[in-house]
C-alpha cells in the first residue's frame, strides 16, 4: 500500500508540474492573443491630416479596425522629410501598440535618402497592402500645350523654365516626374512641398506648371477645366478617367507607376498582434460601405497577407533602386 501511495503521489506531482509548465509556456501567447488588451492603438501617418489619399484611406478604415480590435484607434499625423519623420516614429516605437501607414516613398527612400534614421527591412515589418490608385500628370490651364508630346517639346525648347510640384522628396509625384524627365530627356525644376494639398493649391494658382498627383483628388479640377490632364500612369487607361490617355500609349510604353497604401509595424511587434491587425483591416476592406467609399474615389482595394505585402515591398525597393540610379535622382 505504501508503494502504491508513493507512486500515486509522484504521478500527481508530475501531472501538476506538467500543467504548471504548460501554463507558463502558454502565458505569453495568451497575452498576445489578448492584444491590444484594451490599450489604444496608434496609426502614424507620415503626411498632414486630410492632405493625402493615404491619410484618407487610413481614416476610412480606422472605425472598423477599432471595432474589430475592441479598443480605440487614433491617427497620429507626423509629416515631414519626405515621410521619413513619420516612418521613423513608427520604427522607434516601443509601446507595442503603434503601427504606421506608408506609401511608395517608403520604398523609394531606401535608395534616395543617403542616411535614413531607420533600417527599412530590419526595423519594420509588413502588415498589409490596403489599396492603390492611378496617378495623373496635370498642367495649369494656360500653359501653351495640350498634350504630353507638346509638353516635352516645350520643355526641350525652354530647359529649366518649367517647374513641377511634389509632396516631398521620394513621394510618387517626385519619382514619377523624375522618371519622365529621364525617359524624355528634359529638364524641369522640382519644387517639393510638405503635402499634396499645398502643391495642388499652387498648381491651381499658376505658381507651378505641372504636377503628378493622385487621380481621384485631381479629377474634379480636370473635368471643370481648371487643370489639363496630360496622362495617367497605369499601363491601361484608368477606369475612373478613361478619357485621359496613358503616358505609356503616348510614346513611353514602359512608363508605369501608381500610388499604393499599406501598413507596417515595428519589428518588435509579435506575430500574433500583426495577424490581428491584418485580419481586422482585411475584414474592413470587405465591408460594403467601405468598398463603395473607396471605389467611388477611384481607389482599388487590394488586401492580403503580411507575406504578400512583404513581397510587394521587396519588389518596389528593387524597382526604385534601379530607377533612382539610372535617372540619377537626388533630393532637392
Image: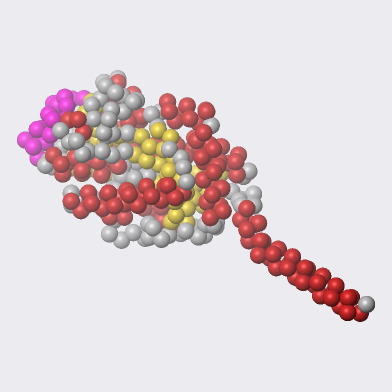
Q: Position of residue 199 (x, y in %)?
A: 29, 37
Q: Is residue 160 visible?
A: no
**Residue 142 part of the magenta-drawn span:** yes
Classify residue 89 as left or right of residue 97: left
> On the rendered image, what quadrant is the N terminus found in?
bottom right
- In the orientation shown, which residue stands out farthest toward the bottom? 2
Q: Residue at x 19, y 36 (%)?
A: 253
Q: Is residue 312 visible?
A: yes
Closest to the observer, 152 or 167: 152
Q: Quadrant of residue 301?
A: top left
- In the orientation shown, which residue stands out farthest toward the left? 157
Q: Residue at x 13, y 39 (%)?
A: 184
**Residue 153 part of the magenta-drawn span:** yes
Q: Residue at x 44, y 54 (%)?
A: 125
Count of marks placed on residues: 0
Which stretch appears magenta?
Answer: 138-159
Q: Is residue 211 above or below residue 227?
A: below
Q: Position of residue 74 (x, y in %)?
A: 53, 44
Closest to the observer, 326 or 89: 326
Amino acid at each position: 500500500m505504501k508503494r502504491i501511495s508513493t507512486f500515486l503521489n509522484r504521478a500527481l506531482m508530475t501531472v501538476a508540474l506538467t500543467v504548471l509548465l504548460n501554463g507558463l509556456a502558454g502565458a505569453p501567447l495568451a497575452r498576445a492573443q489578448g492584444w491590444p488588451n484594451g490599450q489604444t492603438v496608434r496609426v502614424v501617418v507620415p503626411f498632414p491630416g486630410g492632405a493625402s489619399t493615404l491619410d484618407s484611406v487610413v481614416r476610412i478604415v480606422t472605425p472598423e479596425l477599432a471595432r474589430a480590435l475592441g479598443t480605440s484607434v487614433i491617427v497620429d499625423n507626423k509629416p515631414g522629410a519626405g515621410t521619413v519623420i513619420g516612418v521613423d516614429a513608427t520604427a522607434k516605437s516601443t509601446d507595442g501598440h503603434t503601427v504606421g501607414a506608408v506609401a511608395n516613398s517608403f520604398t523609394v527612400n531606401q535608395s534616395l535618402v543617403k542616411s535614413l534614421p531607420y533600417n527599412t527591412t530590419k526595423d519594420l515589418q509588413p502588415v498589409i497592402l490596403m489599396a492603390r490608385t492611378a496617378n495623373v500628370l496635370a498642367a495649369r490651364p494656360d500653359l501653351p500645350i495640350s498634350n504630353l508630346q507638346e509638353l516635352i517639346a516645350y520643355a526641350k525648347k525652354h530647359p529649366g523654365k518649367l517647374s513641377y510640384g511634389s509632396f516631398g522628396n521620394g513621394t510618387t509625384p517626385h519619382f514619377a516626374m523624375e522618371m519622365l524627365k529621364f525617359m524624355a530627356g528634359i529638364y524641369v525644376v522640382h519644387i517639393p512641398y510638405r503635402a499634396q494639398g499645398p502643391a495642388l493649391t499652387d498648381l491651381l494658382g499658376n505658381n507651378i506648371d505641372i504636377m503628378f498627383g493622385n487621380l481621384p483628388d485631381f479629377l474634379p479640377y480636370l473635368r471643370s477645366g481648371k487643370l489639363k490632364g496630360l496622362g495617367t500612369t497605369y499601363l491601361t487607361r484608368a477606369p475612373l478617367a478613361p478619357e485621359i490617355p496613358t503616358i505609356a500609349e503616348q510614346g513611353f510604353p514602359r512608363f508605369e507607376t501608381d500610388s499604393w497604401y499599406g501598413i507596417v509595424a515595428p519589428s518588435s511587434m509579435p506575430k500574433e498582434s500583426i495577424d490581428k491587425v491584418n485580419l481586422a483591416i482585411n475584414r474592413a476592406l470587405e465591408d460594403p460601405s467601405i468598398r463603395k467609399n473607396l471605389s467611388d474615389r477611384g481607389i482599388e482595394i487590394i488586401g492580403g497577407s503580411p507575406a504578400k505585402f512583404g513581397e510587394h515591398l521587396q519588389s518596389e525597393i528593387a524597382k526604385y533602386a534601379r530607377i533612382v540610379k539610372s535617372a540619377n535622382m537626388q533630393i532637392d
